[in-house]
Amino acid sequence: MDKSLLVDVGRRLLASLASDGVGVEAALWGCDVGERWLLWIAPNKFANGHSFYLTLAKTLTKHRGSIGRLETSGARLVESYNPIIMELKKFGRVRPDSPILLESKRVGGFSRTRAFSFRSGDG
């Protein structure tokens, strides 16, 4: 999968979430064991996982034309205290237009040989 395409889809989703009132602390694309890319999202705040996924589904439906064919199953909710998110903070603020490749780096106790962050901090 073309990483620039993933970053572009992720940016459009985060912009759409922001327009729907959902702030995001960090976002990370990671490739799981089955070679499937998942967008890990750490929202600033949410009531519970169910409410976040419901909001995500509504946003994906509402902004389908600009986001593309990303489904809720292509995203994973991550709490801000997750070791991966805590570790991403060590990289400082990651601007959406300047992703950080995490290939061959150990992040938050996980070996992420195929992952990259495109949103972290205030960005």
Image: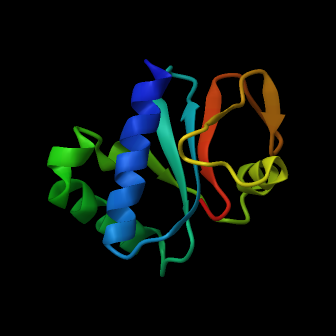
Type of colouring: rainbow
Q: Is residue 95 left or right of residue 60?
A: right
* Quadrant assignment, res 82: bottom right
Percent across and percent down for residue 9 are 36, 39
Q: Quadrant of the rendered structure where residue 17 is?
A: bottom left
Q: Residue at x 26, y 45 (%)?
A: 67
Instruction: State the image quarter where residue 56 is shown.
Output: bottom left
Quadrant, the C terminus: bottom right
Seen at 50% across and 20% down, the residue is 35
Residue at (49% x, 77% y) in the render: 46
Quick check: 25 above or below 108? Answer: below
Total labels drawn: 0
In x, y percent, where is residue 81? 73, 65
**Horizontal and vertical percent position of residue 99:** 61, 37
Q: Residue furthest bottom?
A: 47
Q: Using the image, determine if residue 1 lies above or below residue 4.
A: above
Q: Is residue 6 above or below residue 24?
A: above
Q: Observer-nearest residue: 23 or 55?
A: 23
Residue 68 in the figure: left or right of residue 7: left
Above/below status of 118 relative to 79: above
Q: Quadrant of the N terminus?
A: top left
Instruction: Give how far across and how far down residue 44 sits, in percent.
Output: 57, 72
Taking the spot 42% from the left edge, 72% from the top edge, the residue there is 22
Q: Nearer the viewer, residue 64 or 78?
A: 64
